[in-house]
Image (cartoon, rainbow, N blue to C red):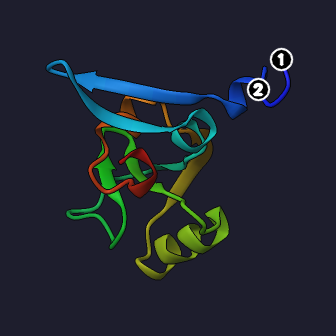
Amino acid sequence: MPGSSGSPAGRRTVSLRAGRLAHSAPAAALLGGRVLEVILDAPPAEAPPGFRLTPAGLETDLGRGTAEAALALCRAYRLTVRATRVRLKSLDEAMLDPLDATAR
């Protein structure tokens, strides 16, 4: 059919909460967020700005930033990084993240 998109990236994803529209956005926007997971030798007492504490260390939403810039912040805070991983946000994270402007 002309004008329709058959690819999932062209489709909109909607989320309902209590029977009302909670979120509506292109699927690519909802699932396109990247998260940097940082595994540390020892967790810090508090997370550096922009990071969240996890059982294994830290994580941060990369947004338009780079993993290298986030890791430079870890170095500035003298954190011993054991390993890192960049992953895509899950659909649950994208829908539940109140700071994610693309999910509104």
Q: What residue is at 35 percent from the left and 26 percent from the top?
A: 15
Residue shown at 28% from the left, 23% from the top: 16
Q: Is residue 104 left or right of residue 22?
A: right
**Mark 1 surroundings within 10 Å by alpha-carbon count, few (fewer than 14), some (14 through 19), many (20 or more):** few
Where's residue 93, x and y in %?
38, 36
Mark 2 crowdedness (10 Å alpha carbons): few <14, some 14-19, many ≥20: few
Question: What amino acid is at disc 1?
Answer: Met
Residue at numbered disc 1: 1
Q: Secondary structure at mark 1?
A: loop
Give the side of residue 31 with respect to residue 93, left or right.
right
Q: Nearer the viewer, residue 81 or 90?
A: 90
Mark 1 near mark 2, Cβ–Cβ under 8 Å? yes
**Residue sticking out furthest to the left:** 18
* Gap between marks 1 and 2 measured at Cα: 6 Å
In this view, the residue in front, 73 or 42, is 73
Q: Determine which of the numbered discs, if any, sits on residue 4 in the image.
A: 2
How many numbered circles are shown? Answer: 2
Residue projecting furthest to the bottom: 76
Instruction: Please tell me which residue is depicted at 60% across the width and 39% down the height of the picture.
Output: 87
Q: Position of residue 29 (x, y in %)?
A: 57, 44
Decide which of 29, 2 is in the foreground and name it.
2
Query: Residue 17, located in which quarter of the rendered image?
Result: top left
- The correct choice, above or below, for 15 with respect to 101 in the image is above
| Mark 2 residue type | Ser
Q: Residue 101 location in percent, x, y?
A: 40, 57
